[in-house]
Every structure is written in structure tokens, then in C-alpha cells.
Image (cartoon, rainbow, N blue to C red):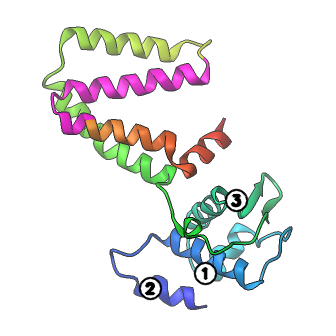
Amino acid sequence: MAFKSQVRSAPATADRIYERLARQLIGELASGRYKVGDRLPAERELAAEYEVSRPAVREAMIALEVQGLIEVRIGSGAYVRRLPGNSEEESTFHATAFEVTEARLLFEGAAASLAAAHITDQELAELDGLVLQMRRPDLRVGESEAADRAFHLLIAKATRNPVVLDTVERLWELRTTSPECILLHEKSW
């Protein structure tokens, strides 16, 4: 397959593997390889065919699902919902849940380290209150997310660095606005 050579020779600034795989699959949908209602090959088969990891296949499937091209049915597989048109939006990829989580791990850990040097007693008390709130057994999903967000933003604020605060705010915004993140988050509840 042409995709295999693209993976090996791709420059460091190229799309991620899942994006290239998703584009390849979109091309195959457009070419007629799969029809509406067809079941796509299993994750392991796609990984072997394109010589990519199963997580890359999962990310590509999420990207196609967000674009409404496929429907993933738990325990059954991925099915073609519609064929791609000529829309540029279909080849546009948003931040994935993995990418947002990866960035959060980098920034929020460093933010906590910096905040430790500047945090006030009042902010520590607020953090304690947020931790107690998140531990409540009767906490609803929305309340839990709000408390979690407030916790991380308070730590970012305690760094006394507005760039850190803006970055952490943007990461939380991506978590709630990226179609891929939204879809994965919905499926996890």
C-alpha cells in the first residue's frame, strides 16, 4: 500500500500517523472500496494492513466517527454511515483526547511545581475544599468536571504566571470543544 511508504518517509513536521491513516481510509471510502452499511475490517486487521499500531487505528476511527463517516458499535465493529464528499472539513482534524491529555500532563505537572513556590494559605484551603468536593460520592458528572477544572485552574493561577494560566485554560477549553475529545468523553460515561 502507498500508505506504508508514507509512514516510513514522513518528515517530523508531517501529520500524525492516525491522521494519515484516517485520510487514507477516507480516500478508500470515496473510491468505493467500502459502501454505506459495510463493516470495516477489525482494528487488528487494519493495524496489520497499514503497518500501524492499534492505538493509531483507534484514533483514526474516532476521527472518522466525529466526521460522521462511520459509526462504531461496541462489540460489533465500525460501519460506514456515509461516504465522504468534497468538503475540506472532512480532512480537518482537531485535537484528540490523547493529545489534550498529553499536553495537560506536561503543563499541569510543571504548573503544580511552580505553584508550590507561590501558593497562599487561602489557595491551599480552596484546593482542599475542591478535593473534598470531588470525593463526594453523590457528585454528578457535571459537578465533578467543574470541580476538577476549578482545581487545575486554581493551581495555574497560583503560579502567578498569566501565560501558564492561559495555557491551562486553553487546554480545558480544548477538552470541551474538540469534537474528538467530546466524542471520547461521551463514550467514557
Q: Is residue 61 above or below residue 31?
A: above
- Asked if the stretch drawn in magenta spans residue 159, the answer is yes
- Asked if the stretch drawn in magenta spans residue 48, the answer is no
Please tell me whether the stretch drawn in magenta is mainly helix, strand or loop: helix
Residue 114, given in percent of the width and then of the height, sits at 17, 32
| Viewer-side label of 1, 3 | 3
Q: Which residue, given by chain and number where applicable, does mark 1 sit on?
A: 50
- Which residue is located at x 62 percent, y 61 percent? 58
Q: Is residue 167 above or below residue 90?
A: above
Residue that sits furthest to the right in the current view: 37
Q: Residues within 10 Å of mark 1 (few under 14, many from 20)?
A: some
The earlier-in-sequence mark between 3 and 2 is 2
How far separated are the C-alphas under marks 3 and 2? Answer: 29 Å
SS class, disc 2: helix
- Which residue is located at x 45 percent, y 69 percent? 16
Q: Amino acid at mark 2?
A: Arg
The earlier-in-sequence mark between 2 and 1 is 2
Look at the image and give the residue range highlighted in magenta. Answer: 140-165
Determine which quarter of the picture holds residue 159.
top left
- Which residue is located at x 39 percent, y 10 percent? 129
Residue 34, given in percent of the width and then of the height, sits at 79, 78
SS class, disc 1: helix
How far separated are the C-alphas under marks 2 and 1? Answer: 11 Å
Q: Does residue 111 appear to the left or right of 55 in the view shown?
A: left
How far separated are the C-alphas under marks 1 and 3? Answer: 22 Å
Q: Which residue, given by chain and number where applicable, does mark 2 sit on?
A: 8
Q: Residues within 10 Å of mark 3 (few under 14, many from 20)?
A: some
